[in-house]
Amino acid sequence: MVKNAKKVVAISMLMSTMVVVSACGSSSSTDSPTSSAKETAAASGEKVTISYGGWSLDTMTDVIKAFNASHPNIEVKAENTPYKQYFTKLETAAQGGTMPDVLWMNGPNFIKYAENNMLKDLSDNIKKDQVDLKNYPTSLISLYSLGGKNYGIPKDYDTIGLWYNKKLFDEKGIPYPDGTWDWAKLTEAAKKLTDSSKGIYGFAAPMMNQEDYYNTILQAGGNIISDDHKKSGFDQPEAIEGLKFLTDLIQVHKVSPTLAQMTETAPADLFTSGKLAMYFDGSWAAFTIIQNAEMKNNADVAPLPKGKKQGVVIHGLSHVISANSKHPKEAWEFVKFLGSKEAAEIAAKQGGAIPAFKGSEAAWLAAFPQYHAKAFIDMTEYATPYPVSKNTSVWTTYETEILKNAWTGEKPVADAAKELGAKMNQALAAEK
């Protein structure tokens, strides 16, 4: 969900260069990790307590119970921290050598911790226990790999979809969005759905990176950052096209609220209040929408529309182990269990994000039978990992400062994009 990375412009973080590497594992799966765990516990002869850090750990209660039941000599102690304080607290713990044995990690923060030797390299464990990394989306394996080493086992993930109000579509006699939609179809439908007399907008184009312009830049054939994380993609023609598609919906086509209006009332709130026909939002939004009495059965979701190509950003959390853990064997047994299909299915029943273990998404999908939520899963086939570098927060701050001038119309999109590209390149050069 977005707490994994949402509104990264507001996330304070330290980053290092993310190297996307091949992360193919060996042939066996993690379906039954418990037998070797019992051997590990039995070998010690003593009960070992390991700490488990994260936020929203209430969604993992049953998973922890299942692990403790099958591993009598290992006790997992959950350390839940609100998301807003999690990484600040984690940084303090890292400096003091007191990080939890096992913890949640997100993409924007991963490289800082891995590059500074705060995380245990799991490559040998994965090979020794034949954990099959093909059980997880390749993009997530890449996100938590650095220099050819694997540091995490994917926990869950999220992608972005086109949410729409079926009631508003029906009133205008417009067919619902589907996988054939492109930018032209979205724009055409948004024009028909916009009704200024009722205060209804056809689409919302906020200045949000993960939900919006990262995706349209990919759909235009561009990128946010080069594969070697040394060069910005913002100043390239494709990125400018992806940005301009969104700003045109506000300034040219007049089918989206303005930036000021969307600052006053978020698109998600406009949508659930029936004032917005379409917007981009993540798989996490399903939990909010289904709890809204008006939208519960009037909403649905489709894949993001195509530009020159299909494109969507994927992000997800991973379980990692502290390099300073005093119980690395037991911590690995827990991480191996957390990465199993058994754990994924238990967690999915408790709610939360889409489980990363392939084939275990059924429990998550079952929570939203009225929506075409499988679109979020199907889009992983062409998803691109969330863009990061060593100091991501530096250039995401530039995004906020510079792109707002394009969103308000005070500066041409191309000028703002080139300015942002130059500033981001300076920031990337300073990371060396």
Image: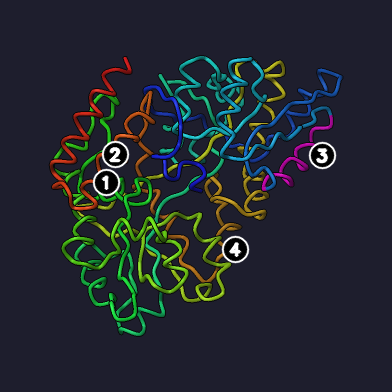
Amino acid at pointer 1: Lys
- Which numbered tag is attached to residue 401? 2
Q: Position of residue 169 (x, y in %)?
A: 35, 79
Q: Is residue 351 above or below residue 116?
A: below
Amino acid at pointer 4: Ala
Distance from the alpha carbon under mark 1 to that under mark 2: 6 Å
Residue 143 appears left or right of 343:
left
N-terminal label among 3 and 4: 3
Q: Residues within 10 Å of mark 1 (few under 14, many from 20)?
A: some
Residue range (magenta) = 59-72
Residue 397 appears left or right of 91:
left
Q: Residues within 10 Å of mark 2 (few under 14, many from 20)?
A: few
Q: Position of residue 427 (x, y in %)?
A: 28, 24
Amino acid at pointer 3: Ala
Q: Secondary structure at mark 3?
A: helix
Q: Nearer the viewer, mark 3 or mark 2?
A: 2
Distance from the alpha carbon under mark 3 to that under mark 2: 51 Å
Q: Secondary structure at mark 2?
A: helix
Front position in the image: 160 or 253: 253
Distance from the alpha carbon under mark 2 to that under mark 4: 39 Å
- Which numbered tag is attached to residue 404? 1
The reply to whether dot 1 and dot 2 touch (C-beta < 8 Å) is yes
The reply to whether dot 1 and dot 4 touch (C-beta < 8 Å) is no
